[in-house]
Image: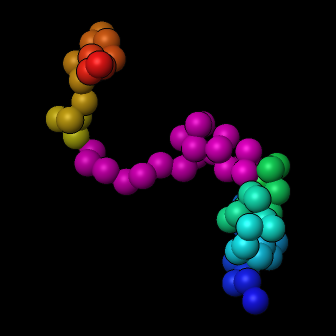
Amino acid sequence: MAKTVACPVCGAPVAWSPKSPWRPFCSERCKTIDLGDWASERHVIAGRSDAAGEAPAGAGPAPRGH
């Protein structure tokens, strides 16, 4: 028997199995809502409050190694 978890967006029960392709979400809609929340910074990962680890303003992206 598959374990059941709650969808993090709407709370609907989701079977944790290959038959639930959007797990832990109940649907593609809930998955997209969650992605939008991250993109709009409604969800954030707590970190240091100072800017010591940030690149200087105007600095381009880090060089890519090939």
Look at the image and tell me whether residue 11 can be seen: no
Q: Is residue 26 above or below residue 62?
A: below
Q: Work out which residue is located at the far bottom of the displayed protein and give it.
A: 1
Residue 57 rendering spot, x and y as whole percentages: 28, 15
Look at the image and tell me whether residue 65 can be seen: yes
Q: Quadrant of the N terminus?
A: bottom right
Q: Which of 32 and 58 is in front in this view?
A: 32
Q: In which quarter of the image is residue 63?
A: top left
Q: Is residue 13 above or below residue 25?
A: below
Q: Is residue 25 above or below residue 52?
A: below
Q: Work out which residue is located at the far front of the displayed protein and give it.
A: 66
Query: What residue do we see at 67% from left, 40% from top?
Result: 36
32 in magenta: yes
Q: Which of 17 and 11 is in front in this view?
A: 17
- The magenta segment is 31-49
Residue 49 rendering spot, x and y as whole percentages: 27, 45
Would residue 46 appear left or right of 66 to someone viewing this image? right
